[in-house]
């Protein structure tokens, strides 16, 4: 290469290096370098700032979020009593809670005497406008605001936060804690300060008065959360994921230690890179080993300079552009060698060919490559079928542990699958793998394969369990590989729809999916077409056979499809979300008919889990009761699965329903997630024993089960209703077992409401 060409290449390299540096291309590399520099510096914090951590253990102890404001008041009072100098909350107090709770917190702020600060922050709305979240006025009357915004996001990491808000002059927590310091507009944080040595106190310990006063006395305190569930987590250099409040601690410590960094940007690095380029173009071409030595030495010298500027003068100098340009010079030197050039070309061709036919992450075949392999097997009469396997829990593992661990689990999953089968294996989607089979697997062989794939995966000290679902299709003469793969996809989709572990393709699957689409489309307009109806199943006193209540059951006679079973359209409505509209119609129509017919007994309506999630159930019930039907005669039936997890929002909804007079019944008791703990703690009034227990009560053990459930309900002052009673013998046994009410075909099929009112009718 001539000197002129070398000069042109050098100029081009410098221009590219400068442009990419200004565009932030080298920011991730610089971030890694700065993590090492910060770790090498490792400064001790001032020990003047304490972090009160609302951690996962504290959340579990309290059991709800947002916490009642009285708890925040209790924490503030405790800190002041322990001698804390100043307390800053990195918690949003812009929304109102219950008046008594807000008043309690306001009193604590007033008692703090102006030494408490509350978080204020600016956020961007969907329209692009600025929106402020600021403490309630009654809180601002007794506590100053502190800005908790962050800025300086680069390479996905937080490097700085604003010292104050330019438009309002509102100071940050760091500024509040260091009022005597000259504060820059953007406070660049020194992560060389070891945040692992910051004194941290659990909120739970503080609330339990279990904190050593020596840890807090005379100190400044920041209260925030590290719990993953509250999503106040940021990525920072050196320390990785940090609570937002800990970033505020880092900024305050930076000011306290006089270590506010000054960012010099890429310019010093670019000047040094230009000097390196000048030397490389003017000096004779060196041998490769000497060139490598000079580049490495210069890179180490630049790193030493950068660390020295940082350690002594708090100056940040980006070095990645210099290293990138130095590396580029070596690459050019290598490319200048013909042998290296040819080898590199061959390697690139091989890599491109590989990526065209394989998944880069796992090494599995691509879909196109799998189809080609399957077609070759068809031509050799070797292909017996296709098996699709879907990994169901990889995304959950990634969200909780980190997606690099989930990716590694998928890699190990593929390796395990590839070792267990003989045919071609492809990765069709991120979580779906296809296997070509030379022999169809028996049920036992498939079970062994699935069991092996679901064994836990050991990754970086974690044991990740993956659940899988499968779909298979058998090859028949005349089928193409594409059609075989499509049939396996259909089988997998059927398994997912029916919540099965797996499914083999059957010819009627397409018909079922077509029927499902037809039912879904017709159901969306069923209310508007006036196709829905209600049938009422009688609820009868066990001993007197008097009708005391009815359960409203939804029926559908479609103009297009005819009679559609509830067992078919109700699950589909729950999946699609149309159950909210249907449930609303049932509640209003059942109450309206009960009032219109003069029904004086109890009325039961069913509310699906999806209604609690996607709608305001209390508002719906209150609207239905506007028909005039009394709330104290309305029963709301829910399945036990909806409350087994103890979701607080569900419990609060049930309590609100009971507050307006409505009774709560657990339907199909014993068939799902039965738990004595929720029977004792949840606001319920009735237990409905599932008909499956009635079918078993001709045996001594079966009868004892119902007797035990009835006795438990009585002990908890709960009414007992038994479903599915069909014979006089079953009724007699249930009467002896002290069950209050029964319902079933013994007293007739569901039909219209009785016209003579409750208690006046005796069931046949």
Image: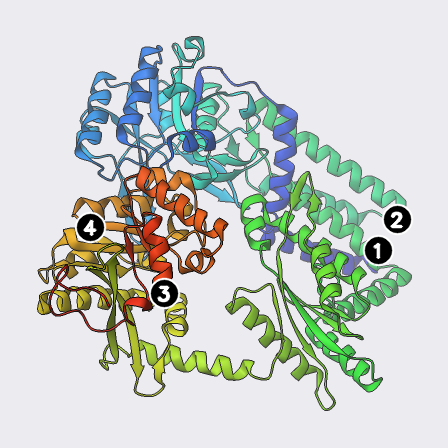
Give the colour scheme shown: rainbow
> Mark 1 vs mark 3: which is more N-terminal?
1
Secondary structure under tag 4 reads loop
Secondary structure under tag 2 reads helix
Q: Residue furthest bottom?
A: 478
Secondary structure under tag 1 reads helix
Q: Residue at x 71, y 82 (%)?
A: 481
- Residue 304, how many percent across, how many down? 70, 30
> Mark 1 vs mark 4: which is more N-terminal?
1
- Residue 499, how many percent across, how many down? 53, 64
Q: Calculate the distance from the C-alpha at mark 2 to the C-alpha at mark 3.
A: 96 Å
Q: Determine whether label 4 and label 2 are within 8 Å by CB.
A: no
Q: Calculate the distance from the C-alpha at mark 1 to the C-alpha at mark 4.
A: 81 Å
Q: Which mark is residue 662?
A: 4
Name the residue carrying label 3.
Answer: 727
In the foreground, 284 or 679: 679
Q: Residue at x 47, y 22 (%)?
A: 253
| Neighbour tally class for label 2: few under 14, some 14-19, many 20 plus, Cα within 10 Å | few
Q: Residue at x 48, y 15 (%)?
A: 47
Q: Determine whether label 1 and label 2 are within 8 Å by CB.
A: yes
- Residue 21, how many percent across, how many down? 59, 49
Q: Calculate the distance from the C-alpha at mark 1 to the C-alpha at mark 2.
A: 8 Å
Q: Quadrant of residue 726?
A: bottom left
Q: Which mark is residue 288?
A: 2
In the rendered structure, the answer to whether residue 475 lies left or right of residue 652 reads right
In the foreground, 209 or 7: 209
> Mark 2 vs mark 3: which is more N-terminal?
2
- Residue 581, how many percent across, how many down? 27, 68
Name the residue carrying label 1.
Answer: 334
């Amino acid at each position: 290469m001539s000197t002129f060409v070398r000069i042109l290449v050098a100029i081009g390299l410098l221009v590219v290096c400068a442009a990419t540096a200004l565009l932030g291309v080298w920011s991730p590399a610089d971030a890694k370098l700065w993590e090492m520099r910060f770790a090498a510096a490792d400064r001790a914090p001032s020990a003047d700032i304490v972090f009160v951590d609302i951690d996962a253990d504290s959340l579990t102890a309290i059991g709800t979020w947002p916490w009642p404001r009285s708890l925040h008041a209790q924490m503030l009072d405790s800190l002041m009593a322990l001698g804390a100098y100043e307390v800053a909350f990195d918690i949003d107090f812009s929304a109102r809670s219950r008046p008594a709770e807000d008043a309690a917190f306001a009193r604590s702020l007033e008692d703090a005497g102006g030494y408490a600060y509350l978080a204020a922050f600016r956020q961007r709305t969907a329209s692009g406008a600025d929106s402020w979240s600021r403490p309630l006025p009654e809180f601002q009357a007794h506590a100053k605001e502190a800005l908790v915004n962050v800025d300086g996001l680069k390479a996905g990491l937080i490097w700085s936060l604003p010292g104050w808000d330019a438009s309002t002059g509102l100071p940050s927590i760091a500024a509040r804690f260091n009022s005597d310091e000259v504060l820059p507009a953007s406070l660049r944080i020194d992560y060389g300060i070891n945040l692992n040595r910051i004194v941290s106190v659990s909120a739970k310990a503080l609330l339990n008065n279990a904190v050593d006063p020596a840890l807090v006395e005379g100190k400044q305190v920041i209260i925030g959360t590290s719990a993953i569930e509250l999503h106040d987590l940021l990525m920072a250099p050196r320390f990785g994921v940090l609570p937002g409040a800990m970033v505020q601690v880092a900024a305050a410590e930076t000011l306290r230690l006089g270590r506010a960094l000054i960012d010099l940007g890429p310019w010093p690095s670019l000047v040094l890179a230009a000097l390196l380029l000048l030397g490389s173009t003017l000096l004779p071409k060196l041998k490769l080993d000497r060139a490598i030595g000079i580049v490495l030495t210069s890179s180490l010298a630049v790193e030493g300079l950068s660390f020295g500027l940082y350690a002594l003068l708090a100056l940040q100098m980006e070095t990645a552009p210099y290293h990138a340009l130095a590396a580029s010079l070596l690459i050019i030197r290598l490319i200048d060698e013909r042998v290296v050039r040819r080898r590199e070309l061959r390697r690139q061709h091989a890599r491109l060919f590989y990526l065209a036919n394989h998944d880069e992450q796992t090494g599995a075949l691509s879909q196109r490559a799998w189809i080609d392999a399957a077609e070759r097997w068809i031509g050799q009469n070797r292909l017996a079928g296709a098996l699709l396997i879907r990994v169901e829990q990889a995304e959950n593992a990634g969200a909780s542990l980190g997606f690099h661990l989930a990716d590694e689990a998928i890699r190990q999953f593929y390796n395990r699958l590839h070792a267990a089968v003989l045919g071609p294996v492809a990765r069709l989607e991120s979580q779906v793998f296809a296997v070509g089979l030379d022999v169809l697997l028996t049920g036992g062989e498939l079970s062994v394969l699935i069991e092996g794939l679901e064994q836990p995966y050991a990754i970086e000290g974690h044991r990740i369990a993956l659940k899988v679902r499968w779909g298979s299709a058998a090859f028949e003469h005349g089928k193409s590989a594409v059609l075989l793969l499509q049939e396996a996809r259909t089988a997998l989709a059927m398994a997912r729809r029916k919540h099965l572990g797996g499914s083999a393709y059957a010819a009627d699957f397409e018909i079922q999916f077509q029927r499902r689409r037809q039912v879904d489309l017709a159901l969306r307009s069923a209310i508007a077409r006036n196709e829905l109806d209600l049938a009422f199943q009688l609820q009868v006193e066990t001993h007197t056979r008097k009708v005391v209540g009815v359960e409203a059951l939804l029926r559908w006679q479609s103009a297009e499809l005819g009679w559609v079973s509830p067992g078919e359209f109700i699950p589909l409505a729950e999946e699609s979300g149309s159950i909210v509209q249907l449930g609303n119609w049932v509640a209003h129509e059942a109450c309206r008919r009960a009032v219109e017919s003069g029904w004086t007994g109890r009325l039961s309506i069913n509310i699906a889990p999806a209604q609690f999630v996607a709608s305001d159930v209390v508002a719906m019930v209150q609207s239905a009761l506007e028909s005039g039907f009394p709330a104290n005669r309305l029963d709301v039936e829910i399945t036990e699965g909806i409350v087994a997890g103890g979701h607080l929002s569900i419990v609060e909804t049930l309590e609100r329903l009971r507050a307006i007079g409505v009774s709560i019944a657990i339907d199909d008791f014993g068939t799902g997630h039965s738990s004595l703990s929720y029977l004792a703690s949840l606001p319920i009034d009735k237990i409905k024993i599932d008909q499956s227990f009635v079918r078993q009560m001709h045996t001594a053990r079966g009868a004892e089960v119902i007797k035990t459930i009835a006795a438990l309900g009585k002990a908890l002052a709960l009414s007992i209703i038994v479903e599915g009673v069909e014979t006089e013998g079953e009724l007699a046994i249930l009467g002896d077992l002290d069950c209050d009410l029964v319902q079933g075909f013994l007293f007739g099929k569901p039909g219209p409401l009785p016209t003579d009112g409750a208690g006046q009718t005796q069931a046949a």
